[in-house]
Amino acid sequence: MATTHLALAPLLLLLLLLDAVFLSTEVTAQPAAPAPGPAGPINVTAILEKGGQFVTFTRLLNTTQIGNQINIQVNSSSEGMTVFAPTDNAFQNLKPGTLNKLSPDDQVKLILYHVSPKFYTLDDLLSVSNPVRTQASGRDAGAIYGLNFTGQGNQVNVSTGVIETRVSNALSKERPLAVYVVDMVLLPEEMFGERKISPVAPGPKSKSPGVSDDSEDESSKKAAAPSEKSGSGEMKAGLGFGLGLVLLCLKFIV
Ligand SMILES: *[C@@H]1O[C@H](CO)[C@@H](O)[C@H](O)[C@H]1NC(C)=O
Ligand SMILES: *[C@@H]1O[C@H](CO)[C@@H](O)[C@H](O)[C@H]1NC(C)=O
Ligand SMILES: *[C@@H]1O[C@H](CO)[C@@H](O)[C@H](O)[C@H]1NC(C)=O
Ligand SMILES: *[C@@H]1O[C@H](CO)[C@@H](O)[C@H](O)[C@H]1NC(C)=O
Ligand SMILES: *[C@@H]1O[C@H](CO)[C@@H](O)[C@H](O)[C@H]1NC(C)=O
């Protein structure tokens, strides 16, 4: 009897030890578990740099301060954000001068149009209700600046009314920030469409379908803006970016 007990003792000890080992790994595993989530502050520029082919977009995010705004908003809002990042090729394929022809304010709007104030997985985009609002939504009274998504199988396309292209692989797909690659610059209908933006002033000027002469349009937009009410809800939602944009405009003026 006593001998069998003695023989069992080392076994018991071993079991206890093993148990202790497992317990301790469990204990040490606990604090390590949340790490894969928010490992430091999110930096959209760093994500794009890893992608390697987004030099132009990164530069625009930087000069407009929109990159910083994204980093801040992603950290502070519960909705998360989604960024559609055009490749350098996409910018090269624009008609020469497209960007430079835009007023500083429109350049900002163009970049804001590539950012949605909500986190979407590809699956979400397959079933989202169109149009999806962007950070440019509500910046002009009456202008939607929305993106439309359509899917087939697991392929998602984004359409602006001016261009349509595929939403390809994700540089980031963890909540709160999704970054998807697009191989075309998303040109908003409100800026590049046949009948640019004129829900506010539908005056007798529908004869010139030209794109280049912005100045007249620009001033009529501004004059009409304060009296237009329908976009006010969206305007509120856009306020988060307001301060940054004010700073930005100052920067452009200086
Ligand atoms: C984000 O990453 C870029 C590129 O790696 C770096 O230059 C910048 O300082 C970073 N910003 C922050 C706030 O960490
Ligand atoms: C970002 O812009 C600042 C000036 O606003 C400039 O000093 C800096 O070099 C830029 N960084 C990148 C990565 O373009
Ligand atoms: C993120 O938000 C938390 C609190 O909401 C704040 O303490 C922290 O400083 C923020 N981090 C950055 C990088 O903004
Ligand atoms: C986007 O979808 C909405 C709703 O289906 C539709 O009314 C609108 O015309 C579409 N816009 C474009 C540019 O396809
Ligand atoms: C998506 O866009 C691509 C490129 O513009 C086009 O070839 C394709 O037919 C579109 N797919 C769908 C489902 O509309």
Image: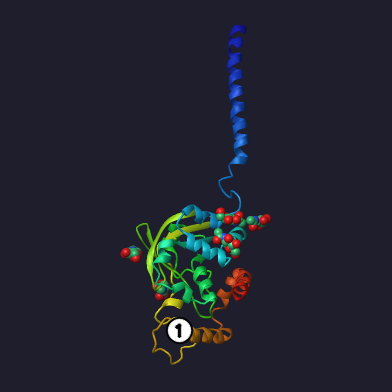
Residue topped by disc 1: 213
Q: Quadrant of residue 241?
A: bottom right
Looking at the rendering, in which quadrant would you find the N terminus? top right
User: Which amino acid type corresponds to the residue marked 1 in the rendered image?
Assistant: Asp
Residue toward you, 157 or 9: 157
Identity of the residue drawn at 60% across and 40% down? 32
Instruction: Looking at the picture, tell me which residue is in the foreground, 236 or 65.
Output: 65
Q: Position of residue 81 (x, y in %)?
A: 53, 61
Classify mark 1: helix, strand or loop.
loop
Q: Is residue 34 above or below residue 224?
A: above
Residue sitting nearer the eye, 45 or 236: 45
Residue 110 in the image: state x and y as whole percent. 49, 71
Q: Residue at x 51, y 68 (%)?
A: 111
Q: Residue at x 46, y 61 (%)?
A: 85
The percent coordinates of residue 138 (x first, y second) are 54, 75
Q: Is residue 138 visible?
A: no
Residue 244 placement (x, y as % from top left): 62, 69
Other-residue count near label 1 (Cα within 10 Å), few / some / many at <14 / 14–19 / ≥20: few
Mark 1 vs ligand 4: CB below 8 Å: no
Which residue is at a point 49% across and 85% down the rendered structure image?
217
Answer with left or right where residue 175 lies relative to residue 188.
Answer: right
Q: Is residue 32 visible?
A: yes
Residue 252 position by quadrant: bottom right
Image quadrant assignment for residue 43: bottom right
**Relative horizontal placement of residue 11, taking residue 187 as reference (left or right):** right
